Image (cartoon, rainbow, N blue to C red):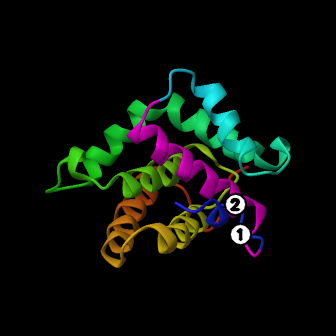
Amino acid sequence: MDLDLIVNPEWSQRRQNRTAAFRFLYQWELNPPDDLSADLHEFLEKLEKDENYFSYTIDLVDGILEKLEEIDSLITELVTNWEFSRIAKTDLAILRLGIYEILYRLDVPPVVVIDEALEISKDFCSDNSRKFLNGVLDQASKRSGRPNRERLV
């Protein structure tokens, strides 16, 4: 994956942060580090921006890994007729990111989370993946009971 896709200057800071979180989660899934915190900070240093710029990335990654069991359990429930282990690693990283934001980031409306996940997937996933991601994240949003277009915080 090209690091330029993470820090595309045309994207908002939030999208850059989400993309960095996605990229790190993808890497983490393929090759779990011994020292997660050090690995994340080293990853962010390579992006050549002030670490504070990526504070949302750190919040996302820490939150996702803290809630990973719950998030993966929900993904397993929502992905019918498909084994969890067969989900493409890029799709899994986006699902974990999106579901975490839908369930735990009440400052972001679910419709924004889904739109951002689909925008990120345009650069990293296939057209079929986008349909799959949209369906699963839409189900997660409905299950959350949150209003789709409103922030709760």
Q: Which image quarter: residue 74?
A: top left
The amino acid beneath tag 2 is Gln
User: Residue 142 location, x and y as percent?
Assistant: 42, 59
Region in magenta: 10-32
Is 141 displayed left or right of 22 in the figure? left
Residue 70 quadrant: top left
Residue position marked by numbered label 2 in the rendering: 16
Residue 59 visible (yes or no): no
Question: Mark 2 near mark 1, Cβ–Cβ under 8 Å?
Answer: yes
Helix, strand or loop for disc 1: loop
**Residue at 66 percent of width and 57 percent of height:** 108
The x and y percentages for residue 54 are 76, 47
The dominant secondary structure in magenta is helix
User: Is residue 99 magenta-colored?
Assistant: no
Q: Quick check: 16 above or below 10?
A: above
Q: Crowding near pointer 2: few (<14 within 10 Å), some, many (20+)?
A: many
Q: Horizontal and vertical percent for residue 11? A: 72, 71
Residue 151 as seen in the image, left or right of residue 131: right
Q: Residue at x 38, y 58 (%)?
A: 91
Give the residue type that dot 1 points to. Asn
| Residue marked by disc 1 | 8
At horizontal 36% and vertical 40% (from top left) the residue drawn is 72
Q: Residue 79, image x and y in percent?
A: 25, 54
Side (left or right) of 127 relative to 110 = left
For numbered disc 2, what is the local secondary structure? helix
Q: Residue at x 44, y 34 (%)?
A: 68
CA gap, disc 2 and disc 1: 7 Å
